[in-house]
Image: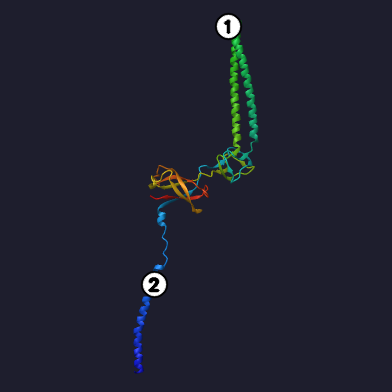
């Protein structure tokens, strides 16, 4: 066989074999990819379905007793007793205002009251004497031992004494009212806690001049913790008083709190198509404090 013929046969053989090998290689690659595809991890399912099952309402935690204590009279703060963070009970002294002038006026009023009381006792004793004189004069008149003029004189003295007793009694009442008024002013110089709770803020310092109506302290109770909420009218009739819901604190996302519905408005606001309610935390309230933001989870209808 000539060399040219051998080369021709070799070229024809390669032309047949190469496409076959290429086709096999392609089929093998496709098979490998198809087999490997199911082994890839699947993406997690979105929780949007769970979120749609509840209505989330946000708002601050509040307490019923929370207020600013205001000065009830003009004066100077003589002494600060309580500092922010202090726990107080009803009636505990928070600050004392200068009461020296009031105390002097009160002592003078008490002295006047004692003096008028003594005058009234003297007039009452004299009235008994004059009443006895009148009774004796009446008996003597009945026995024709004295003149009618003497009897009338005894009556006049007894009646005049009764009017004096009434006059002094009015003076005594006025004096006691003055004393009571000064006592009330004295009480206004004592800044006391109206309820049990915490001193949240102090707005004044020792020696400061304050006017009536100035803020002195901010006192807040520690509980019960509550939250007001507003929901669509379609939930009216579905929410019930006493029903327990879940409440979350954004600062402590891992903790769930129990919140019981304490109030539900029976009226729907026609402008917004909503009604109001309030829940109260029950059970463990650790980490929950007045003023913190909270989220209430309400099941959708």
Q: Residue furthest top?
A: 144
- Horizontally, is 121 left or right of 57 in the view? right
Query: Between disc 1 and disc 2, whose residue precedes?
Result: 2
Residue 93 placement (x, y as % from top left): 60, 39
Q: At which x and y percent is residue 37?
A: 39, 69
Front in this rendered view, residue 217 or 52: 52
Count the labels in the image. 2
According to the picture, the residue beneath numbered tag 2 turns out to be 33
Residue at the image point whose x is 64% and y is 22% from the top = 118
User: Could you say where residue 139 lies in the image, as x and y percent from the top left?
Assistant: 59, 8
Q: On the picture, is 24 further left or further right than 147?
A: left
Picture residue at 60% right of the left edge, 22% below the top = 168
Residue designated by label 1 = 142
Q: Report x, y in % for residue 149.
A: 60, 8
Q: Secondary structure at mark 1?
A: helix
Within 10 Å of the Cα at label 1, are there few (<14), some (14-19), or many (20+) other Cα atoms?
Answer: few
Where 177 sits versus 22, above or below?
above
Q: CA distance from mark 1 to mark 2?
A: 144 Å
Of marks 1 and 2, the one in the foreground: 2
Q: Are dots 1 and 2 in contact, CB under 8 Å?
A: no
């Amino acid at each position: 066989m000539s060399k040219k013929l051998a080369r021709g046969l070799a070229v024809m053989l390669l032309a047949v074999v190469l496409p076959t090998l290429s086709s096999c290689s392609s089929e093998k690659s496709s098979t490998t990819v198809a087999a490997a595809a199911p082994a890839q991890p699947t993406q997690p399912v979105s929780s949007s379905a769970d979120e749609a099952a509840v209505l989330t309402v946000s708002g601050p935690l509040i307490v019923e007793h929370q207020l600013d204590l205001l000065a009830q009279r003009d004066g100077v703060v003589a002494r600060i007793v309580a500092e922010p963070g202090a726990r107080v009970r009803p009636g505990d002294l928070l600050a004392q205002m200068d009461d020296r002038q009031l105390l002097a006026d009160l002592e003078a009023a008490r002295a006047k009251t004692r003096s008028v009381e003594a005058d009234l006792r003297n007039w009452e004793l004299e009235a008994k004497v004059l009443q006895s004189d009148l009774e004796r004069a009446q008996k003597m008149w009945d026995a024709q031992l004295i003149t009618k003029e003497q009897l009338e004189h005894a009556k006049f003295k007894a009646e005049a004494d009764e009017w004096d007793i009434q006059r002094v009694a009015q003076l005594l009442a006025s004096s006691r009212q003055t004393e009571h008024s000064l006592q009330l002013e004295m009480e206004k110089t004592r800044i006391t806690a109206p309820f049990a709770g915490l001193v949240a803020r102090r707005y004044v310092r020792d020696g400061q001049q304050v006017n009536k109506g100035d803020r002195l302290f901010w006192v807040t109770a520690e509980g019960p913790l509550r939250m007001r909420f507003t929901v669509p009218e379609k939930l009216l009739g579905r929410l019930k008083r006493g029903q327990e819901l879940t409440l979350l604190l954004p600062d402590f996302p891992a903790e769930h709190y129990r919140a019981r519905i304490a109030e539900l408005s029976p009226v729907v606001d026609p402008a917004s198509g909503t009604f109001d309610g309030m829940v109260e935390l029950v059970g463990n309230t650790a980490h929950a404090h007045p003023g913190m933001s909270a989220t209430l989870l309400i099941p959708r209808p």
